[in-house]
Amino acid sequence: MTNIIFDTNAARDFVAGVQLEELEEYARDMAGLFEDSEIKLNVSPVVIQELLYHLVDSDDRDFSVSFKAIKAMMLVQEHQRKDGVHEMMSPAELLIAHEIYHMRSESRELMYSQLMSIANTIAHGGIEDIPDLHTIDGGTVKTYVDDIENGFVEQIREVCKSMVILAQHNNLTFEEELQTPEAESVLVTYFSRTTYNLLMNEGKLPDYHQFLPNFVPYSPEAERKMREFHRFMDESNKEIIRRYPAFLKLVKEVVRRIHQSGNQISDDKLKNYIWDISLMFHVNDHTVNQQPFRFVTSDKTMLLASGAFHDSQNVMNYAEFKNWILG
C-alpha cells in the first residue's frame, strides 16, 4: 500500500472540473480507483485548515473549490476506511509535543479535532450548509491562520538577518553558515518555541520568562536556571533536527531564497511556506507507518531543490499523480 498526501493546491486540483452534484459519485469512484491501485489517501488537518480558511467568506474566490476539495477528500477517506472512522495526521506541534517533550497538548488536539469534525460535517452537507468556523478560543479559522502566517513571515525574515550576522561573525559564506549546528538550532527554534509555549500555557512546562535576565534579577540561582533552560532548549532543538531532516532542509531553502532575493520575496509567498514546512514533519524516512508514501504538491521544484526528498519519485505534481493512477 502506498500512502499519498495532498498539499492544499493539489487538493484543489483533485476536484478541478468536478461539479458539486458529482462530488459524491466522484469520491466513490476515486476511492475504488485508489483501492485498485493500492493507494491510501491521508488527510492532514493542516491542509483542511487552509481550505477552511476560504470558507469563512462565501465571496472568497476559492470558496467553491475549497469546499469541494474538503468534501471529496473526506468522502474518499471514509470510503477507504471500511469502518467509516477518519484518521488525522498529527500536525507539527503535536508531533514535537509528543516525541520531543513527551507530553500532549490537549488544547491543540481539541482544536484540530474540531477542524476535522467540521470537515466531516462538510463532507455530508451542501455548500449552503457550512458549519460554524470558530476555533476553540472563539476566533475564526481565518483569524487563526492569518496570525500564524503573519508571525511566521516576521520570524523567518528575522532568522535570515540572523544568518547574515552569524556568517559575518564566523567569517563564513551565507551557505556555509546555514550548515553549522548553531545556525540549524536557530532555524528550528521558531517551531520548538511554539510547542513550548503551548505546553507552558497548559501548565506543563515552566514559564520561560523566569529564565530570561531581562525579567529576573541576577543571582547565582537565576543564572543556573537560565543555563539549564538554554541547555534544555538546545537539546530539544538537536532532537528535532535529528528526527525531522526534511523539515529542516525546507526551512533552509526558504531562508536561502529570502537571502538570494535581497529580502524582496513577497510576504504572500512566504506565508504559503509555513504550511509546506509543517507538512514536511510527515516526510522523515519517506514512509507512513512503515509503508511508502508520495507527496502530491504544487511546489515539487522547490522541494526537490531543498533536498527534502532524496528520491524524486516520492514527490510529484498533480498532473504526474493523475498519470500515475490512470496509467
Image (tube, rainbow, N blue to C red):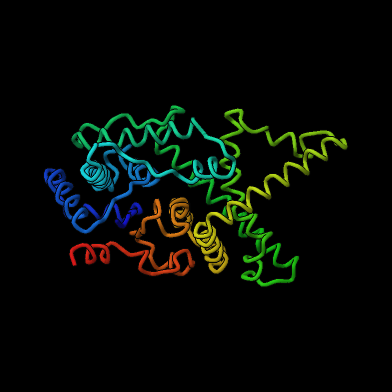
Q: Give the percent coordinates (x, y) of residue 298.
A: 35, 61
Q: In the rendered image, which quarter is residue 38 located in?
A: bottom left
Left or right of residue 265, residue 301 in this image: left
Q: In the rendered image, which quarter is residue 258 located in?
A: bottom right
Q: Is residue 71 above or below residue 291?
A: above
Left or right of residue 275, residue 183 in this image: right
- Is 211 in front, or is 145? 211
Residue located farthest toward the right when viewing the structure as drawn: 220
In the rendered image, is residue 64 in sight? no
- Is 97 in front, or is 261? 97
Q: Which residue is located at x 54 percent, y 45 percent? A: 151
Q: Give the percent coordinates (x, y) of residue 10.
A: 30, 56
Quarter of the image containing the N terminus? bottom left
- Is 179 in front, or is 61? 179
Q: Give the percent coordinates (x, y) of residue 36.
A: 18, 56
Quarter of the image containing the C terminus? bottom left
Q: Give the percent coordinates (x, y) of residue 172.
A: 70, 71
Q: Which residue is located at x 53 percent, y 49 percent? A: 152
Q: In this view, does 187 lie above or below 208?
A: below
